[in-house]
Image (cartoon, rainbow, N blue to C red):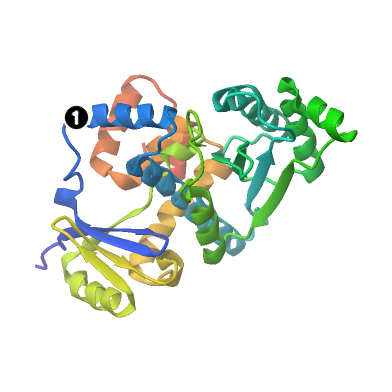
Amino acid sequence: MLEAPVFLNNLKIAGNKITVYSSSVEYVGRRVNNGENLKTDRKKAYQGEQSVSSINRVKENLYAWCYSIAEGNRFNKFRGSKKRIRLVLATLTLSSKQVHPDKEIKSKILEPFLKKLKYEYDIVNYFWRAEPQENGNIHFHLVIDKFIDKVDLQDYWNDCQNKLGYIDRYLERTGKVNPPSTQIEIFDGSAKSIEYLLKYLTKENTRRKIEGLQMRVSNKLSHLKLGVIELYNYEENELADLLEEKAVRKYVNEWATIYYFDFDAYFYFSYHFITIRNLFYYRKLFDALYYYDMSSFEVYVVSMFFRNRIKFGYLMKDLERQGFDLVRVKNLLEIDG
């Protein structure tokens, strides 16, 4: 009788990096007072500082979002569906010299603008990043997953700007109305476009500090995590040889081995076993977001199914005891009962 294969290591792919680590040390380095660390990260964020851990969390959310869209679009073509999701990057600038604090700009211009997009275009998945321009004005990079007419985008943004008088001051200065305050760029979901998008959105701010939050992902996207591939013991040598051959750099510590490449590893290895096991995961995330239009909590439950089956089992039992409707989650994950 053959022995069951043993899982020894886990693997994650994000952009040009593959990390191989033991499941037994997944949480090594996370101190017992992790809740206090999270509070500290939030305090720093509101003071205009972005911790490395918070940036990495956002990067993971964005990579998982991009990969789920790429796989969902590919699978849609296979199953004969014309539904295709593309990411849109909008740049939003102030039309006059900034005379209000950054936090007020975000609360009285950006937040009403996002609510307008939700009402008019049903946009609920988004990411924004605040940065200072050379002239010192705050401006925003906003990523959404639906196309919006560029005229509408500019009209909505200018209308929200004028809640604090920025269009009126532009008119006084130039004698013109409806200033060109927005730009739109559409991404095709290729490896090259994802790499550009992630680097552009998370690059270091070398100018003045932004007051308060510098970046934020919407609620659903905050639950998207990179897929974790469990490696069988007999696969390790083959994998190590492959990664050693293709990597341009390697970093090793007592917890993990990290391989760096001069290409996006997820797309490059798309037909290799280390990626194929992830396709189903990203496909289900895509369907949770764009077919079932699941709530933020349902997306969290779906993600948990792939990240920690034991914890998922306890969670489902607890939710059933509380009377939650889990039909959509079970249908998506093809779970009986």
Q: Is residue 106 above or below residue 128?
A: above
Q: Quadrant of the C terminus?
A: top left
**Number of dots carrying numbers:** 1
Q: Is residue 95 left or right of residue 245?
A: right
Q: Position of residue 303 (x, y in %)?
A: 38, 42
Q: Quadrant of residue 193?
A: bottom right
Mark 1, residue position? 33
Query: Which residue: 46% across, 43% down?
Result: 332
137 displayed left or right of 261 = right
**From the viewer's perspective, is 49 left or right of 142?**
left
Residue 242, image x and y in percent?
29, 77
Quarter residue 154 falls in: top right
| Residue 125 visible somewhere in the drawing | yes
SS at circle 1: loop
Q: Position of residue 59 (x, y in %)?
A: 43, 48
Q: Position of residue 147 (x, y in %)?
A: 71, 47
Left or right? Give the position of 261 relative to 291: left
Q: Residue furthest bottom?
A: 245
Q: Residue at x 66, y 30 (%)?
A: 98
